[in-house]
Image (spheres, rainbow, N blue to C red):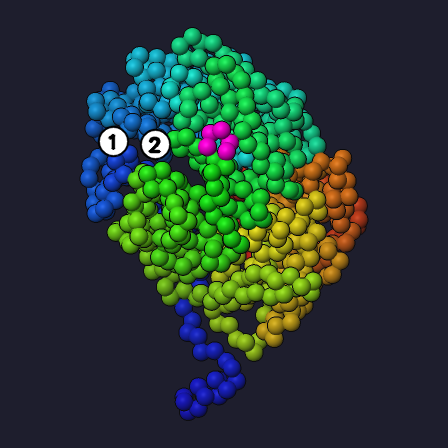
Amino acid sequence: MKKLLTLVMLLLGLTTAKAGEDLRLEDITRGVYSARGVYGINPLNDGESYSMLDGKCIKTFSFKTGQETGVLFDANNTKNTSLNSYIDGYIMSPDEKTILIRTESEPIYRRSMKATYFIYNVRNKTLDPLSENGPQECPVFSPDGNQIAFVRDGNIFLVKLLFNNSESQVTKDGEYNKIINGKPDWVYEEEFVTDCSLCFNADNTMLMWIRYDESEVPLYSFPMFKGLAPELRENAEYPGQYTYKYPVAGAKNSKVSVHSYDIKSHVTRKMKLEIGEEDYIPRIFATSDPAKVAIFTMPRHQDRMDVYMANPRSSECKMVLRDEVAPYITEDMYNSIHFFDGGFVFCSERDGWNHIYQYDLNGTLKKQVTKGKFEILDFYGYDPTTGSYYYSSNEESPLRSGIYKTDAKGKVTKLSQHTGTNGAIFSKNYKYFVNTYTDLNTPLVTQVCDQNGKTIRVLRDNKEVLDKLSGKNLGTKEFFTFTTGEGVELNGCIIKPWNFDASKKYPVILFQYGGPGNQQVLDQWNIGNCGGALLEQYLGQQGYISVIVDGRGTGGRGAAFEKQTYLKLGQLEAKDQVETAIYMSKQSYVDKDRIGIWGWSFGGFNTLMSMSEGRPVFRAGVAVAPPTSWRYYDTVYTERFMRTPKENPTGYEESCISRASQLSGQVLICHGMADDNVHYRNTAEYVEALVQANKTNFKQLVFTNRNHSIYGGQTRLFLYTSLVEWFNEKMK
């Protein structure tokens, strides 16, 4: 009878999956199944070893053997000061004789922080505070390791280690919401991906920095309540508020300039940089020539990058390179800049794909290092002794990345041995590298490899994550492609329930982001949400299929694919999510009347745009922290893709707000009131548009004192619980 039953089930196409344990949303949001990386790895000058933070110690390890070789710093074995604070980072001086120990870090915005730093002398084992006058920001060593510059309250300070750590003030005009020296303002930090605008020149005699005059940038304020987790008791009787400078599209930006300080004579100079008042200065870099500090500039349209060489003493500036890439230059370019003795390397999309170019300090092109229909994802370095370049690229597939070397003759060697998503940290002599890799079913693995990619030592494999998930009800994750009705081929990933039965009809939930250059469909563990797509797996336990598709405008497929959304953000992206829903509705195992969509940030915007695209394919949706009109978002990001509202009124008019009357399906809108990135204003104005359009098919959740990430205490659990309950209520 048992054999007969099995045969009947097979003939009927039924599954015989054995039930295990269900995932708990509480465990997912608490990070019970989170994969951990290895932090604080720093290759040392000898090329044979690296240092790594281990609790209150900084230890050294051999690349060749993987064995521990010594202890550079031990908080319990220092002179002068007993360090009781948690150590959350460190910075080595170029000569490795001094270490800055970072403690008590407090985040400011996404990348910036203030912290209390200690100066540790490796030889004498002395530990002294970098400054006793308050926390410090973005400290920088001089090339010889004898000086440290840092920022506090918008001003630059200099500490000389050879003069008993004497501290002097370099600038005195710093003032909150007016003048910032040496560190970026909000929009530079967020959109040019930087937290420091400060460097020494090559011979340690001059200090250079970018000065931001944000006096004319409009202010933005949001209320702060007492709240809980954390509780802000200063707001117990009356709410407080946070006010800062935030330039929305078309508004005034900071006026930027570059300055130098002669450390011996104490003379400050302004560089004679002939750029427009609205131009950007995203970066400055020291070069190997003391008389040349590289200044990178862009016009407000961000379709050109100019490189100037500034003499910090004479203040004369000479443009040595102009890179013009229509319609805009991506922010990723700044991650690939690498200076070496006599030259520099950076990436450009000038031929339609992101590739490596090498120049001398006079701006003469020496060679285009890589070519082909693939993208350079990260540049790790150039070895002048062998003429080899080290980088990661998606040469094999837009979904995957590998680590590569190109030698002086152009021969390409793949160094990574694992298919999926790879990253690297190379030794100073490029004989070894720390390889991180992951794929759809493998949590992050961190290992040490030799120059051929052979594994020497596994530092962390996160096997415990897989052990914890063993026996849980986990469905399959599979990649797929399909062609839209407009003839566009798109990449996707589908997560089916653990007990998937092809003869049944399942509701489907799309998760997407969709912003310019972003990719969600990648061969990595962190696809989807919560690592291992565990939120999607949890939804699978609720009976849903989850689908992730990268539409037009996303990255990994060249400039033409990415930049076709220029001047019309949200229009093509929404069409592609609707096309995804239509494609899924044609699958035999999908209930075409129960398709949902959700996303966060740009994904929240894309959710609302897709649900009001005109084709009512979505039953329900959730939009988290959505920008609902690009008129409300910042200058640098928005104008890169849309120009200004005055230049592109039609593009700005196509927004969630203008489409409010077209909203179909039931939507839940979630937003944090202390979101410094996508302001709650976006949701407030959108909800008002829905009210005035007499649309009752929505609900909003507002989170007290929460920023763009909406976390703290039980907040994330509440958010995801609300999301699941919304879909259960509206789609079952």
Disc 1/disc 2 C-alpha distance (Å): 10 Å
Q: Quadrant of residue 129?
A: top left
The secondary element bearing badge 2 is classed as strand
In magenta stretch: residue 565: no
Residue 688 image point, x, y percent: 75, 43
Q: Main secondary structure of the magenta part?
A: loop
Residue 473 image point, x, y percent: 44, 66
In the displayed structure, 218 sits above or below 14; it is: above
Q: What residue range appears in magenta?
A: 360-364
In front of the other: 435 or 368: 368
In the displayed structure, 240 sits above or below 59; it is: above
Q: Can residue 688 be seen from the camera position used here?
A: no
The single residue placed furthest to the top in the displayed view is 265
Compared across the picture, whether 667 is left or right of 187 comes to right
Look at mark 2 in the image and give the residue it sits on.
Answer: 90
- Residue at x-position 46% and y-position 51%: 393
- Residue at x-position 25% and y-position 44%: 63
Residue 324 image point, x, y percent: 61, 38
In front of the other: 383 or 210: 383
Q: Are marks 1 and 2 in contact (CB under 8 Å)?
A: yes
The secondary element bearing badge 1 is classed as strand
The three-letter amino acid code for the residue at tag 1 is: Phe
